[in-house]
Amino acid sequence: MNNTLNDQSEKNDCTSVSGRQDMVFAFHVSFFAMCRLSSLPWTTLEMELQNEESWEIILDILKQTCLHSRCRKTPPSVKYRRLFLSELIKRHEATTTEPLDELYDAFGEVLGAEEEPVCYKSYLLPSGDAVSVSESVAVISQGTTGLVTWEAALYLAEWALENPQVFTGRVVLELGSGAGLTGAAVCRSSGPRRYVFSDYHPSVLQRLRSNARLNGLAVADSDDDDDDDGGVGTAASVEELDWAAVSEERLRELGAETVIASDVVYDPDVIGCLVGLLSRILRFTVCTDVYISSTVRNPTPMAPSRASSKALESDTRSSKVPSSQSSPTTGLPP
Ligand SMILES: C[S@@+](CC[C@H](N)C(=O)[O-])C[C@H]1O[C@@H](n2cnc3c(N)ncnc32)[C@H](O)[C@@H]1O
């Protein structure tokens, strides 16, 4: 997958794209995913600006970012747009003295905009559609880490896009879903029979519902009388599920055949509880497969997790772990 979900995590950057169209597209993709600004193809832009009419190129980029219709519906944060436009103005002013009204109008608009506590990140699927999630601007807010998308969620989503057969036609339960990016990508691309988002934090559950609906999913939850709210495609639900408190009966009711989770083993204190839950799921329900995606940040918190997952493997039918080696994504420059 080129320039889609695959290319937007921090393991990739767009600094080496060639050709004007590719470059403009790379700006579009990176801008809406709020990739680190330093990873955008500024060097290619500088080279293009030496050869061509500067205003045309800048206007193309502007139309594919701040002036794109997606930016009205699901905009990146105000701070990100402000920093992005400052960089663009810097490149433009380095090559010409001709002002470009659209550029300064866009900058004026963003300077006058109030910073919101939430923003949107959008990721392109291979189909050309985008998956969008509303996230908090702060990494930790309302006492939870679950209101932003973590690096391992991107990796798991990418892996799911490359392995749709793992999910097609199956009932999938996601533990600790957070903002819901992985689930939205799986539902939109892999055709699971039913997808269960879950978490235990009330604000996260609320955000999950709105993000699932934002992506057109037919969302039912335990409080709804109706089965769904009229979305299309995969039937999805958002369930409160605390790893430490969920009963075996409830786990059986959920009927998950495949369980997935991302970035849930960052804290050594929760690993025992999570491994205990996975062990119960594999022993007492119809679930046959578990996939956990994890960001390796430093060896210390991972040590108990490796020991626990070894114990789990010896105890269970199947547990597989796609893992990333990079740091959590922040979207903004350091
Ligand atoms: C670091 S976030 C990862 C969120 C998302 N999976 C991602 O990768 O972007 C960890 C998530 O696990 C959830 N979580 C932590 N402990 C939990 C527990 N005991 N039961 C259910 N969810 C839990 C948190 O609420 C949070 O949403």
Image (tube, helix red, strand yellow):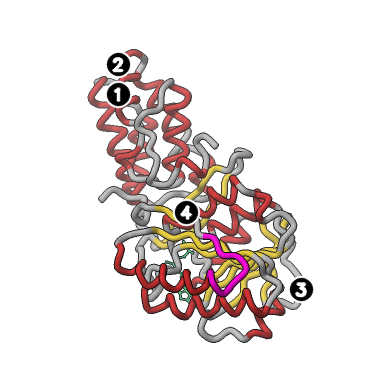
Circles 2, 1 touching at the beta carbon (< 8 Å): yes
Residue lying at 34% horizontally and 45% vertically, measured from the top left: 36
The local secondary structure at tag 1 comes to helix
Q: Which amino acid does label 3 sit on?
A: Asp
Circles 1, 4 touching at the beta carbon (< 8 Å): no
Q: Earlier in the sequence, mark 3 or mark 1?
A: 1
Q: How many marks?
A: 4
Q: Earlier in the sequence, mark 1 or mark 4?
A: 1
At which x and y percent is residue 53?
Answer: 36, 16
Whether residue 319 is situated above or below residue 107 in the rendered picture? below
Mark seen at residue 120: 4
| Range covered by the magenta-colored residues | 313-320
Residue lying at 36% horizontally and 74% vertically, measured from the top left: 268
Residue topped by disc 2:
50
Determine if the magenta segment contains residue 248. Answer: no
The local crowd at label 2, few if under 14, some if 14 to 19, many if 20 or more residues have their Cα within 10 Å, is: few
Circles 3, 1 touching at the beta carbon (< 8 Å): no
Q: Can residue 13 be seen in the rendering of this structure? A: yes
